[in-house]
Structures are given as C-alpha cells and as structure tokens.
Image: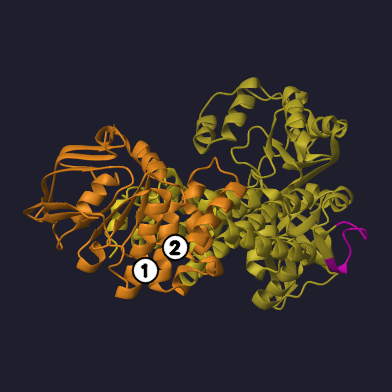
Amino acid sequence: MSLVQLMDVKKHYMLGDTRVDALRGISLEVEKGEFLAIAGPSGSGKSTILNMIGCIDNPTDGKVFIDGTEVEHLTDTQLTRYRRSKIGFIFQSFNLIPVLNVYENIEFPLLLRRSLSRKERDRMVMRFVEEVGLADRLKNKPNELSGGQRQRVAIARALVTSPLIILADEPTANLDSVTGHKIVELMKTINEVDKTTLIFSTHDTHIMEHARRVVQLHDGTVAGDEARG
Amino acid sequence: MAALKIAIRSLLRRKSRMILIAALVVFGTLLLVVGTTLTRSAAIASQASIIHHFTGDFIVYAARSNEIPSPFSFNTPLPVVPELDKVTAFLSAQAEVEAVVPFAQNYSLISVPAKTGTIDLPFIFYAVDPGTYAQTFRNVKMVEGDFFTSGPGILISRDRQEHYLKRYGIRLSVGQPITLIGLGDGGGVNALRATVRGVFEPLYYANVFNYINFMDAASYSQVYNFTGVASGSLPSALEKGLEAASRSEEAVFALAGSDTGSIDTSKLKSEAVSGYTMVAVRLKSHDTMETVRARLAAQGFPVKTARWDEASSFFARIASGIQAFIYFATALIFLVVAFIFMNTLIINITERTAEIGTMRALGGERSFIRAIFLGETLFLNVASALAGMIVSLALVLVFQRTGLPLPETVAMYLVGGGALPMVLSAGPFLVAFVVVVGVSILATLLPVRVATRITPLAAMNDR
C-alpha cells in the first residue's frame, strides 16, 4: 500500500453565506521516499491537501490513508500522537516558537516524546543542526535569525523525529529566490540521503523544477501529475 | 518542564502587562496578610484587654435579670446578685479561678455647695471593693489622690472633673467633702456625707470610661440602704408577686390589685444586701471558662453567667467587623485581579494563536497547552504572592516589635487604646496562598479553554 492514499477527497467550507469547494474529489497516492511538489495557483487547494495528509484537517467526503491507517476515525489525541511520530511540518512563515532558541526549537518535538533521555535528545538535535548548518547559531532566538536561517531551523525541527513524511507548505514563499533555491536543495539532499518522503506545495515554477514529481492542481482538482527524472 | 520553560519565558516576554498584574497580586496579598494579621491581633488584644481590665473571663449576674450585664453599658441598674456570699465562696474555692470581683454600676447625684445654693452633679459610677478591684483590674491611672487607701468616698475621672467645671462651674478636688444622694428603686432618697479621694484617667476604652467614676462598696451600701428582707419571711404570694414585678411593669400593677396575704411583721427577718449587681470572674486559664461556668450552673444558685464577649457590648465585635471589611476589600481586589488576568491571558492567547497551533501540529496535546497557561498563571501569581508575603512578613515583624500605631479613635474602639501589638502567625499567610492559587486557577479556566480549542490548522493560517 502507498504511504499516502487520498481517495476521492472533497472539502468544502462556508465563507459567510458562500460555499467554497476547496477540493472537488482528489485521488492521489504517494510512495515512500518520494520528493513531490504540489503546484498550482492560490486557491487551487494545495494547502488543503497538505492539511489532509498532515492530519490537521478532515475531508468533507472521501478517505485519507497514511501508512495504511485511515485517519478519519482517530480521536484528537490519537491524531496528535500520530502527527508527533509520523509527520514533520515546515511552514511558510517558519512558525518557530519565539521564546525558544535554535537548539530548543529543534529539540521541541523530542520533548513532547517524554521517553527520550537528555543525552539522546542532544545527539539527535546536534545531528540535524550540523545538517542544516546552524551549529554556530544554537543560542540565538528566532528574531535574531534571517529568513533562510529560520527555515533551516524549521527543517531541522521537522527532521529531528525521523518522521515518515515531511510536509512543507510553500516553504520558500517568504524567502528571496537564492535562499529559496538553497532551502529546496537542502530538502532534496535530505530526501536523497535519509529517504524521507517530502511533499511540498509551491506556486513558484523555478522551485517546482527541483521536484521529482509534480502534481498540478486547479480549482480543487488534479490538473496534472508528472514524474520527472 | 518544556511547558514550564515556555510559560516562564512567555511571561518575561510580556513584561509590562505582567508587572501590572504582579503589582495587583502583591498588593492583594499584602492587604490579605497584613489585614488578617491586624484583625487577628486586634481580636487577641481586644480579648486580653477586656478580660484583664473589665469583665474577667465571665460575669455572674442575677438570674432574674432581663439584660446581659456589661461594664461598658449603663442602662437600668441590674438586680443585685442573690446569695452573693455563697456564689463568691463557691467560685473562690475553684482551683481554676484566679480572682472573684463583685461590683455594681449605678447612678447618683453629688450635692455640692454653689454660689446660688447647692448644685446636684450627675454621677455615674462603679461601686467596688477597692482592694479586690484594684488588685485584679488595673485599668486606671491615678492623677491625684489614691484608690481609696485614704478612706471611703468617691473617685472621679479627669474628664468628669473638667466637665463639672466647664458645665456647672464646680471644681471637685481631692479631699473635698460632698454629699452623695442615692435614688432607690422604690423612690426613696438617701444622702451620705463623703469625700473625693482621687482623680484618675482611664487606661483603656477612655471613650467609655471617661464618663465613669468610682465609689467604694461601703459608701454605696449606705447611700442605697442595701438592707433587705430575708427570703422566706414574706407571704409566698407576695414573694411571687414581687418576683414577677421585678420583671415587668404590668406585673407591678397586677401586684397592687391582688390579694397577697397580710405581712406578719414579727416574722420578718432583715438581711444585709451587698448591692453588687455583677461578679467578674477571672480565670487562671481562659480555656477553663466553660468548665467553671457549667460547674457554677450545676450548683443551682439563682444566677446566670455571661461570657466576656457577651458582656463587652459591641467592643468584642469590632475586630470581626473590621475583618469582614478587609475580607470584602481583598475579595474585590482579587476579583479585579482575576478579571484583568483573564482578559490579559485571552489577549495573549489571541496573539499566540499560530504559536499554539504550531505546538499542536508538532504533536503537543491539549494537556501540554493547558500546562503552559496554568504554568504562566501559577508562576506569575505565586511568585507575586510570595513577594507580597515577604513584604507582609517584614511589616508584621516590624509592628510586632513596635506595635502598630493606630489613629486614637480606631485604637480606642479596637483594643481600648495605644499601639496594637501584631501577632505573627502562619494562618494569614496560608489563607493568602490558598486564595492566590485558587483565584489563579479560576482566572485561567476560560483562557485555557480558549487555548486548548485552537486547532493545528491555526499554524497553517499564520501567513
């Protein structure tokens, strides 16, 4: 079975009196180790798909399977634990915790797993700190970092729990193009080295060129699904 | 620990709001601790002052009295204590009893020569056995003369001395002969030549005792001609009628029109009556009060007893009244603190929606979010409460040594006058701690509910 399986997923919500159909019946399968870009213009449903895969939103209709588990019937606590162990998030606005420094932000998901010793946590944090090149910034707070550095922290934080899937919602949208390319290159390297499944949304055509598979969305439907060398 | 770390750092990040809340909590704690300590101290001091200087631990009075006796109130003179000798002998024989002090309150007139003839000055007094009274209740300071060591007569308060001079142009001085005029219950008038033996100032509750003077028991007995007819030598119907007449005015008229039988004068036996209307009983330990009262009641004397606080009129209740006011003021402050804190937390939560959503997305359970906000509240409020307690402790320790200076009138009503000695005890600190923790938790309930309802989607919407 595929790592991610979306079966005729629909999502609509009300905006005042207006019904908005964010997804109009999406079916999609993602295999383990893929480096997938979900592309499309604003409002096409990119973020909504990521929310479904990330178990932070439920479909109005259809089924979502992650690693063989249908997530619809899980309770809030089960979903939280599921996210904690299986999914890493990289956000467009980085979403670092402002009162924690670089080290602590990366360590944060590990602290939520109470079973790990301080030594184990330190080993895991330092491994990814080196990987994203922030060893000299450990004590800095998020507001003391550049956008690119913040996103590197977010990437390390997403990686530190060794999740099955990393979801990145427009990870380069708030970065200049050079930094954006570097970030996507870093994600690509991680995908190649760790075999972590990486799904990211983007509307930037230059960024999506790095992906090995691009799913094009248009008005909540799959307009194209292209594998690249 | 992660939740607590985030909680504390988040507090430090919003210093100005938190300083305002901390200041309110410090003030509230200070008010609660110092206020409660003050009222507890006042209650202790007031009790000690009243027991040691006026009422003893309890007062014995005639069973047929309709009023509870009080050295602080001067209404209709009470009936004399029957079987006084037996009652005092019984009480004196009790191991727990330190002193038995019979006394009476009454009114008379002092008749003195004036330019226009004679003038009658109103005279409110305690009739006391000088030795027993002065030895037990040291509540006056003699400014002239002595406490009846030079002989029987009267003592006047400095305040009354000045009042007589101002109002009547009469200056009473030590050694001056006067005539005491006693008005008996039955309408008879007695006169007695006496001497002013001293002028004093009250040491406690001067607002009441400035109006009160002293007369020695022997003079009192003569002025009021306390000689009665022995119980049992009157016809029983008349005895019963007289008993009823002492209780109500209607019974007096009923007695006048009834056939109570004829009095056989040859069978009448005279009996010396002390005239004392109250017996103050001071105990070695206040804890034995109920035991001794019960033991006295079991003897079947025609007397009743009133606890010191029952006999102290409203003075014993002032401290509890002030305590109620302080509790009310503190409750108001903590209500304001709770309201401000609740709103501040809700504002914080609104500002931190994305942060909370992120934590939820990364796998933070609702209990983790709850722990952060409870941690913030408890850390801030408990730290502020501890600061408030330290300041309070310092204040209480200072006033324990020096006594708390109070405005004269307040001190007079609260403890009888002078500085209030503060009594340090753990109770008020514990109460303050429990109140702060309780208020903190209550004030956090709604904000925590709001925070835990933030979904991980909020993280995605932070753009």
Label annotation for residue A182 = 1
Q: Which chain is orange?
A: A
Quadrant of the rendered image containing residue B395: bottom right
Would residue A194 be counted in the magenta stretch?
A: no
Is label 1 in a helix, a strand or a loop? helix
In the rendered view, does A7 fall on the left or right side of B18? left
Badge 2 amino acid: Val
Label annotation for residue A153 = 2
Q: Which residues are magenta?
A: B142-152
Q: Main secondary structure of the magenta part?
A: loop
Badge 1 amino acid: Lys
Q: Are marks 2 and 1 in contact (CB under 8 Å)?
A: no
In the rendered view, does B447 fall on the left or right side of A102? left
Give the answer, above or below, for where B94 lies relative to A222.
above
Comparing B461 with A17, the one in front is: B461
Q: Indicate the position of residue B397 as horizontal and vertical percent values.
A: 75, 62
Q: Is residue A115 shown to the viewer in this render?
A: yes
Q: Indicate the position of residue B172 as horizontal and vertical percent values.
A: 78, 72
Tag 2 and tag 1 share a subunit: yes
